[in-house]
Image (spheres, coloured by chain):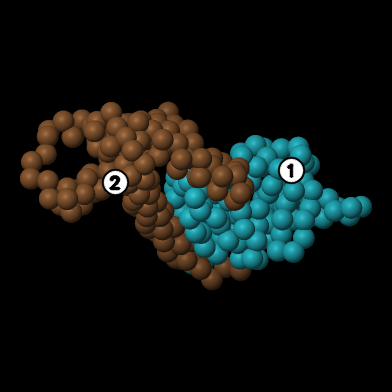
Amino acid sequence: MKSFGNFVQWFLYITVGIMLVCAVGYKAYGAETVSTDIFFEILAAAFFTALITTFLSPKEGDGKTAARIKIAIHYFALWIIMCVIGIKFEWINANPKGIGMMAVYVGAVYLFTFLATCIAELKKAEEINERLKEKYGDEK
Amino acid sequence: MKITIETPKQGEEDEIIVRCAALDERLWQMIQALWSENRLTGYFEDKIVKLSLKEIYYFEAVDNRIFAYTEKETYEIHKKLYELEKEYEHTDFLRISKSVIVNVSKIAYVKPVFSGRLEARLKNGESVIVSRQYVTALKKKIEI
């Protein structure tokens, strides 16, 4: 149940992240028409990447080094799966340039997801800190 | 015997005042019972110390042994972590991971660490990790 909750959370973050990258990409490269298939392709990509993220993201008890290694493995796993999906859906060409571009796209989604998570976590911590201060502020 | 329960003002400590003409055996036993609820026996080398709950920052399970950490000292406690959790569930103590029960009133602040966990910095400068699954319980404990 906990893993399912994590999966849904990652699915939502990643979907929004891919949508942003696509929106910026289409605007920058001046695509005038976009196939409606793109929505299902985005959802499929988000599904597989969220699945990988649920199982490969750092877990309880992982030390700093283990967490960093897992993040690196996770990034490369996402890159590989997104290259396969990208070539299948013709988002990229199956050449070094296309694969290199996918590394950048995955990095952008990674950064967005990381920042979104950080903001949510910071907000939660702030809320707890305020309450702690109210309740126990002067206690030693 | 008349029993009066009053709610203290905000910021005031909970207090039990006994008003009696004479401290008889029955009353003394009640006081002893109340007193022992807030005391815990800690062991350090060959010393046995009565610890007040208020001075304990957190309990930690290490290799099947339980330790209580005060501001500067560490004492072994001859109880299981789940027993302490159950016994002190109505106090400021809260289970925050598989191996730690923290005194929430001793948390100075929390900050996020990767994957939904929080690092709780205690008022004595030590840090403990609040596991993702216990963050909701922490929020509930401090009435968020």
Q: Mark 1: give few (<14), some (14-19) or many (20+) Cα within 10 Å.
A: few
Q: Which mark is residue B62?
A: 1
Q: Which mark is residue A17?
A: 2
Label 1 chain ID: B
Q: Which mark is residue A125?
A: none
Q: Residue at x 35, y 35 (%)?
A: A83
Residue A110, compared with residue B52, is above or below; it is: above
Relative placement, left or right, of A65 versus A73 is right
Say yes or no: labels 2 and 1 on the same chain.
no
Q: Residue at x 76, y 37 (%)?
A: B64
Task: Spot the cyan chain and give its letter.
Answer: B
Q: Is residue B143 visible from the viewing direction of this image?
A: no
Q: Mark 1: which amino acid?
A: Val
Q: Position of residue B142 (x, y in %)?
A: 46, 54
Which residue is at the front of the view, A133 or B98?
A: B98
Q: Position of residue B14 (x, y in %)?
A: 55, 60
Label 2 chain ID: A
